[in-house]
Image: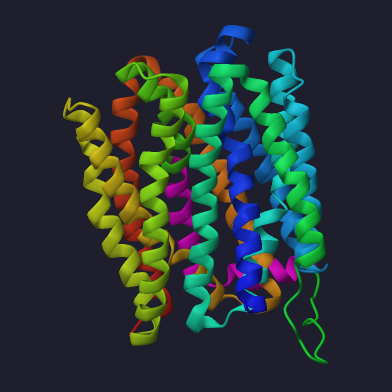
Amino acid sequence: MISLPWKTVLLLASAAALNYADRTSLSAVFPLLQAELALSDLQLAAIGTLFLWSYAFGSPFAGFLADRLPRNRVIVWSLLAWSLVTILTGFARTANELLATRVLLGLAECFYLPAAVALIAEHHPSASRGRALAVHLCGLNAGLVGGGALAGYLGENYGWRIGLFVLGGLGILLSAICSALLQEAPRGDAPRPALGPVGAQIRAVLRKRGYVLLSLQAMLISVGTWMFFNWMPLYFRESFGLSLAVAGFSGTAVLQLSAVLGALVGGTLSDQAAKRTPDGRYRLMTTCYLLCAPCLFMFLSGGGMFVISVAVIVFSFLRAVATANETPAVCDLIDERDRSTAQSLMNMLNTIAGGTGVFVAGALKADWGLNGVFAGVGLLVFFAAGLVWLARRAEFPA
């Protein structure tokens, strides 16, 4: 019999998989979009950028709402809304219509993650929180692989619209299941802690220097992460001549299959590190970032697909071990009543940074090549390691 806390995690991991599958599936069919809608490289970049910037725009409101309403209801309505938008995307006939649906998708999806992370943290104490959030993170990573592979296969055989209809239909079905089964954390007779004005709530979150520094490192990691998500399938297609289905799978699998394993390992190590020493999560993050950053310089080596794939797999695994500590560390710092707001503010910064990174990569692609762009991400990871070290010093000065 699965306990309520872990049933919650499994339901949300499934929703997370669809969340990331829907937002990234179009990157696997970029060549088809270029052929049918005559999109330029910058317009392809705008697919990711507009989604991320609209996600950022709606994130603060999403967090405030999730701290004030039942989080399970916020999750269900967000899941239903983004699934309907995914289906709507399949009916786009022009570049402008396609880009408009990406804005709508960002506004619909931004409500999910702040509510989901806070709900998992409510169900799980610190001793199991790292593992629980790692399983949820695995759902996000699995969605990237499944969404890219499914969209690539269906696109090559039936057209790019079919994958969107399938993913949207699965989302509608899952929203009905979550509506029936997803529950708030038991509180007994205790009500949810009272909240003050929004401004006071934000100030309470931002007074935590460790939170601010962790948010800045998350922004740097998001720049690189979204560059990879958006451009890796096209990189494999152009560099190694792969089919759409294989490129869509390879461009996400080399990142995400290793990331799934890294998240599971990282979640377990995170809980163990936190038991040994209060700053254990920070130490683990810093070490993993310093180890994984040099892997990306292999993009400048001129190596073939095997060399690049191995480098990306090692990078992705270690990065996932590191980032599996991020959300538990934030939940340890932030009061229960403010966690959705804290997560939404991080999401806002991450998606602004990620959207900018996607667009910059598209602008630099012609002159630098994607090899140079991806190698530059390694420098960002080094800076992120420094910010985590500073966060540790801020929260644990001794």
| Residue 117 vs residue 259, the one in the foreground | 259
Q: Is 326 located above or below residue 139 in the figure?
A: below
In reply to whether residue 229 is colored magenta, the answer given is no
The stretch in magenta equals 198-223
Q: Residue at x 30, y 41 (%)?
A: 312
Q: Is residue 146 left or right of residue 86?
A: left
Q: Is 263 located above or below residue 305 in the figure?
A: below
The location of residue 198, given as percent across then percent down, is 78, 66
Q: Is 381 located above or below residue 8 in the figure?
A: above
Q: Residue at x 64, y 70 (%)?
A: 7
Residue 353 in view (yes/no)? yes
On-image quarter of the C terminus: bottom left
Q: Is residue 321 left or right of residue 46?
A: left
SS majority, magenta? helix
Q: Is residue 249 left or right of residue 280?
A: right
Residue 393 in view (yes/no)? no
Residue 169, quarter of picture: top right
| Residue 316 vs residue 48, the one in the foreground | 316
